[in-house]
Image: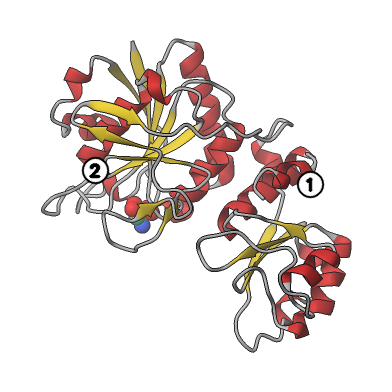
Amino acid sequence: MSVALFTLGGTISVTGGRRLTGADLTAAVPGLSEVGHAVEIQDVEAVSSANLTAAKMLEVVDAASKAVAAGATGVVVTQGTDTLEETAFLVDQVWPHPQPFVLTGAMRNPTLAGPDGPANLLAAVRVACSPAARDLGALVVFKDEIHAARWVRKTHSMSTATFVSPNVGPIGHLVEDRVSVLTRPLRLDGVQGSAEPADLDAIRVALYTVTMDDDGLLLRGLADTHQGLVVAGFGVGHVPAALVPGLEELAARMPVVLTSRTGAGSIGRSTYKSPGSEFDLLQRGLIDGGFLDPYKARVLLRLLLATDDDLATAFGQYV
Ligand code: ASP
């Protein structure tokens, strides 16, 4: 029995002089050998998560699929935490297997007092080989908590408690050496078409956060350069009235998804009716992003455009 470990760099592997490899990372984890599963390492690329690409993640998913086909019980990926909420959600959309796909990292690098990487890696391996974590898609394991990819957010720039799932909380915990899954969210449908790295690379989806007194100048001409747009609106999905004609025009030319910039909760549908309200924007053709935060909505829209999937069906799962 084995767990496939893919390393992608990030703080978990950063020391002053050189990047730690998977062999270095696993050697620093007390108790790993007692988990009872061999860890099969593939060092993919030592890259900060700001430089990770969706195409690279699809390559990792492909390699991970081969590993589970060859008998791996589960998969662990170590990477930088900055984009981990996006990569985890992307993986969740394309991972068809029952085996757990667990992503983790660290906030305190190995040269600091109290680095969290070894504990996170141990917890991630435990979850990856746990029968309780099967059929849950992609998971983020951090600070002995298990988070579903579809809800998890990075919420603090430095704290080791940075990963939280604002709308629901963690779905499980590590308790001593046990994996305890407290709630099992229904698995939603991922993207139906096959997402090819080159197709995804070719799709540009913009993310636009509205701000007070915004004149929308940056949105002009966007449909000439991008294939989709996610709007992070105020509160339940509002924008200044001045942006409405421009957004309506864009929505006629490409998919425009409406989300909330608040960090938790869903956008509304019919509470407010004035120009620029959620009701108004949805009437003008924007797509309801529901509970999806703007970053995940962007990941999903890009995948759907690359696979030619039905947008309403896919986004409809999150409302
Ligand atoms: N800046 C680092 C990265 O995302 C932070 C981390 O690894 O946690 O690669």
> Badge 2: how crowded within 10 Å, few (<14), some, or many (20+)?
many
The residue shown at (69%, 50%) is: 301
Residue matched to label 2: 117
Identified by mark 2, the residue type is Gly
**SS type, badge 2:** helix
The residue shown at (23%, 14%) is: 36
> Badge 1: how crowded within 10 Å, few (<14), some, or many (20+)?
few
x and y, in percent, of residue 97 in the image? 55, 21
Quarter of the image for the N terminus: give it. Answer: top left
Which label's residue is closer to the chain start, 2 or 1? Answer: 2
**308 left or right, relative to 138:** right
Residue matched to label 1: 312
- Nearer-the-camera pick, 100 or 8: 100
Q: Give the distance between the C-alpha atoms of the residues marked 2 and 1, in whole angstroms.
A: 39 Å
Identified by mark 1, the residue type is Ala
Query: Can residue 288 be seen?
Result: yes
Classify 100 as above or below 203: above
x and y, in percent, of residue 80 in the image? 37, 49
Classify 205 as above or below 306: below
Ligand 1's quadrant is bottom left
- Nearer-the-camera pick, 153 or 277: 277
The residue shown at (50%, 24%) is: 135
Res 42 quadrant in image: top left
Q: Is mark 2 within 8 Å of ligand 1?
A: no
Marker disc for residue 55: none
Q: Nearer the viewer, mark 2 or mark 1?
A: 1
Q: Are marks 2 and 1 in contact (CB under 8 Å)?
A: no
Res 155 quadrant in image: bottom left
